[in-house]
Image (cartoon, rainbow, N blue to C red):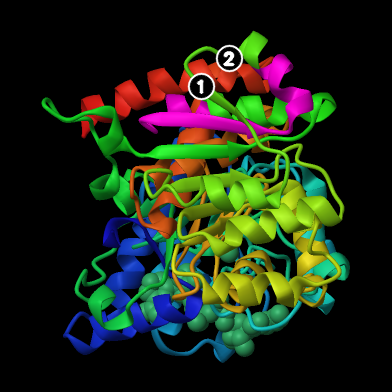
Amino acid sequence: MMKSALLTPAEMKRADEITIDSGVPGIDLMECAGDHVARLARDMCGTEGRVLVVCGPGNNGGDGFVAAQCLQATGRQVDVVLLKEASSLTGDAAIAYSRMGFEGELTTTEGLRQKLLGCSLVIDALFGAGLSRPLQGEAEAFVSAINESGIPVLSVDLPSGLNGETGQVMGGEGGCAIRAERSVTFFRHKPGHYLIPGRVLCGRVDCVDIGIRENALSEIGPTTFINGPDVWSSFFRVPQLGGHKYDRGHAVIFGGPMMTSGAGRLAAGAALRAGAGLVTLVSPPSAVMANATQLTAVMLKSVKEAGGILELLKDPRLNAALIGPGYGLGDNARAAIQAILESDCALVLDADALTNFQHQPTELFDAIHKRAGPVVMTPHDGEFARLFPDLMGLPKLEKARQAALRSGAVLVLKGADTVIASPDGRAVINENAPAWLATAGSGDVLAGIVCAALAQKVSAFEAASMAVWLHGAAGAEVGPGLIAEDLVPALRLVIAKLVGIS
Ligand SMILES: NC(=O)C1=CN([C@@H]2O[C@H](COP(=O)(O)OP(=O)(O)OC[C@H]3O[C@@H](n4cnc5c(N)ncnc54)[C@H](O)[C@@H]3O)[C@@H](O)[C@H]2O)[C@@H](O)CC1
Ligand SMILES: [K+]
């Protein structure tokens, strides 16, 4: 799990300190970092062309001085531009500057524009983990000039102006940040490398080893991770010889009336494909015929009212349920959801199940806190806003964490950078979803996969993380032209590969 840990800039600073306290000089870490930057710079622009290294006042600038020195040592034409006087440098950055062997030039924005003319690569070493406020004045003007030049940029640690913890540009809409082609970071990625817009601004990110002690992680205790098998593979259930379908759980999907019945069918098909031993699609009588004509291995049941649902879920073999996709809004729908909340089964609440509580969210959260079975909620941003309007101004990770804590549910806040947050404080960021996944019915498939993982008795946080990853991998498997129906068969290929490598 520690392999996939993401560190906030403050946690990274702590990892640096722990390493330095253990006897590794800070300048050694910086020299290693700068050496990697130079290597990647050569990778980006080959043997030709002038490199411009733009250095800020802190240790990020220090990495830039080391990189400049390494590049010059290999015969490369290098210019170093300073944002602040060299005399104001302190600590390791001052040492790196003194070892560079040539002077950097303190310049104005106009001077920078002149330097940019005809160079083949810019190394952005203005600000990294120490950025503490939005860029203004000369720093902002430097960033704008670099972006406007159109010259490829390699950012050191983070594109300058980007908040490494939130993935947002410091200063929001009015702020500015470097748009890099590539970035190189140290020891572990930061959440900002994966959260949008950070992920877009970083370009391709390399994470390199600079000698930070691995055991620093146990002291820091990271709570944010990048999603992948490292997070949940020990929970992934592979059917055993001698086992039977009941070992793999029985998922119940509550589908809607005929005109919106497709959502339930997609979820049911996905639940079966994702490994639930049995799947029953429960629907109002009006949808039964439509479902029966399209489904074969999925079992069907017709239930009219909340009373019937309560009765149905008394059967303990029905151990996971999903309600929401295409379900409908109104008093009857809300009564049905309340009936499901009263049962003990593990539960996924999606789409209409969330919107039905937009005027009484605390009623929903109280019911979740009271019940014994786990709950996973899978809102997109619009559904999230209906239940948690006061959290909308927060950065995505924080939004999901606070919503999980308040609701008592594992929260899957969907998007290109889906965040899964647990009420216990853990969170993962997903990065394998292709843009093709943003299509009608895609969320229904995801909800079905979560339900299948819960039916197989995977803990809620791992079930949600696993499902989001499988969904993204299925999307990548299908690729261009994807429609939601394609995801269900593609899951077979994804699971086959997963089992093959695990
Ligand atoms: N020993 C270490 O701590 C190591 C640090 N490393 C590098 O050091 C970086 C962190 O260094 P620092 O903590 O010095 O931080 P930075 O170099 O990112 O920036 C800190 C400096 O910028 C100023 N500043 C912050 N926000 C500003 C703004 N909006 N406008 C103008 N000035 C602003 C601060 O007052 C401070 O002088 C990492 O990102 C990484 O690149 C690496 O060299 C590895 C080792
Ligand atoms: K930078």
Q: Which residue is mark 2?
A: 295
Q: Name the residue type under label 1.
A: Val
On the image, the x and y values in percent for residue 286 come to: 79, 25
Query: How far across and how far down the image is residue 393, in percent?
Result: 79, 73
Q: Quadrant of the N terminus?
A: bottom left
100 sits left or right of 103 in the view: left
Q: Which amino acid type corresponds to the residue marked 2 in the rendered image? A: Leu
Q: Which quadrant of the figure has residue 107?
A: bottom right
Res 459 visible: yes
Question: Badge 1: few (under 14), some or many (20 or more) residues near its Cα, within 10 Å?
Answer: some
Rendered image quadrant of residue 268: top right
Residue 94 position, x and y percent, is 45, 83
The answer to whether 132 appears left or right of 473 in the picture is right
Residue beneath the point at 32% across and 81% down: 220
- Residue named by callout 1: 298
Which of the pair 447/319 is nearer the observer?
319
Which span of residues is magenta-colored? Answer: 270-291
Q: Is the residue under label 2 in contact with that under label 1 (CB below 8 Å)?
A: yes
Label 1: element kind: loop
Q: Is residue 285 magenta?
A: yes
- Quadrant of the frame with the C terminus: top left
